[in-house]
Amino acid sequence: MKMRNIAVGVTGLNNIDSPGPGIPVIRALRESSHFNVRIIGLSYESLEPGIYMHELVDKVYQLPLPTAGITLLKERLHYIHNREQIDVIIPNFDAELHNFIRIGPWLKETLGIATFLPSPDSFEERQKSELNKFGEKYGVKVPASYMISQVTELKKLEEEIDYPMMIKGRYYDAYIASSIEQATSFFYKIVAKWGYPVIVQEFISGTEVNVTALGDGEGRCIGAVPMRKLYITDKGKAWSGISLEDDQLMQIAHTIIEKSRWRGGCELEFIKTKKEEYYLLEMNPRFPAWVYLANGCGQNHVEALVKMAMGEEVKPFTRYKSGKMFIRYSFDMIVDISEFEQISTTGEMTH
Amino acid sequence: MNIRKNIAISENGFIFNPLTGDSFTVNETGLFILRRLKEGESHETIMKALQDEFELDANSAEIDLNDFLSMLKSYQLTEYEDA
């Protein structure tokens, strides 16, 4: 089969201890049997390791931070596109997705760059703060969640939920509190870092199981692979994991993707209780950093996403291998200061 | 008590439960029991086979088998049963 040449822009090159999905996404694309890819890395900081991985990334451009807004982002992407003729962009950071969803139509119509992202409504309805409604709408068990903005509300919540309870930031961070004193301390900690509101959630005891999945936006789940973390870092990230064979979990994942008409990659995080009930904790609106495991199990979700972004017909995957493990490792690259200088001063890196 | 159908048991006693992702190693006796459970043999038949194979009296065979079965249950290697 003749391979098609395409250029793909990828963010999330921070392959660190709390890794972004960029490098796994690129590795999946490099293994495509359909596309010959030229990778345009899109970075935010000069020390994102992916910037220096010449064998994986062909050229790198820095982007303005998401907080700079969409006008600057559009200008920058216009500039990059004039040089690289990008076909598809895969954004991989939670914080940038909102902007990319907003400029999606502009990217397509003005620059001819395809994306494959959820609709603004789909993106919003799975926010952590909307979890109760989300669970009710799609018939999925979720832990009872309450949004609070005052520390005094914690005391009132003691009547609704027992200790331990989860104290969570709106976007990141989660702590287990076993007393009102701990809950209060975590409340202030989260407010200082992430602002209001704070989410107080029922603690569900069990095993965490996650699913990496891909939806076509028309109500089909194109692929899904479940995984259990085997080794967790102090930041709660999976350093090792194994693919599972769990029909009930797969059925729930398919239902969520199909009913919500999810478009693009996502990660579903569940707790499985001893009674074999599944509670959805979070739905992350992009591929997880462990998405490369799906390749190892026989499903190249990233290639399928690019095909759909380019308007090609994709058939859903029907099988995957369980018992496949991923094990991360750390690796030191030796980089000349001139490369660091290049990305730091010009915002570009040519390999 | 039925062993989960998709449990993988290797020849050298490595057990993989694809439902939970857990893996275990068992000794010769454990492997002897697990293989028979997977083939659907009854506890009575397995107990008798244990006695014959390892020259055990009925009481010791029963205690050892029940111990092992409760361990299998605690590691979710058996089909889920409502308490």
Image (tube, rainbow, N blue to C red):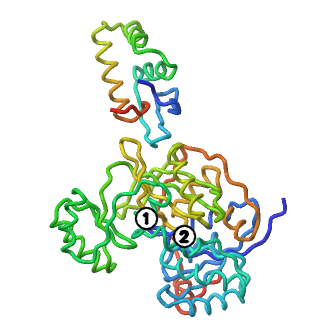
Q: Quadrant of residue A82?
A: bottom right
Asked if the residues shown at circle 2 and circle 1 are in contact, with their CB atoms under 8 angstroms apart, the answer is: no
According to the picture, the residue beneath numbered tag 2 turns out to be A122
Indicate the chain on which mark 2 is placed.
A
Dot 1: chain letter: A
Q: Residue B80's image quarter?
A: top left
CA gap between label 2 and label 1 equals 13 Å
Q: Amino acid at mark 1?
A: Lys
Image point 66% across, 65% down: which residue? A305
Q: Quadrant of the C terminus of chain B?
A: top left
Q: Position of residue A9 (x, y in %)?
A: 64, 77
Q: Residue at x 44, y 25 (%)?
A: B2
Task: Tell me what residue is drawn at x 45 percent, y 70 percent.
Answer: A127
* Residue B35 against residue A51 in the figure, above or below: above
Q: Which residue is mark 1?
A: A133
Mark 1: which secondary structure? helix
Q: Would you say A3 lies left or right of A181 here?
A: right
- Kindly indicate the quadrant of the structure image that contains residue B71: top left
Compared across the picture, whether A24 is left or right of B44 comes to: right
Q: Callout 2: few (<14), some (14-19), or many (20+) C-alpha neighbours within 10 Å?
A: some
Number of numbered tags placed on the structure image: 2
Residue sitting farthest toward the front: A137
Amino acid residing under circle 2: Ser
Indicate the quadrant containing the N terminus of chain B: top left, top right, bottom left or bottom right.
top left
Badge 1 density bin: few <14, some 14–19, many ≥20, Cα 10 Å: some
Vertical placement of B41 versus A276: above or below? above
Outermost residue to the left: A181
Location of residue A190 with respect to B55 vertically, above or below:
below
Q: In front: B40, or A78?
A: B40
Q: Whole-percent x and y of residue A136?
A: 44, 59
Q: Residue at x 84, y 63 (%)?
A: A2
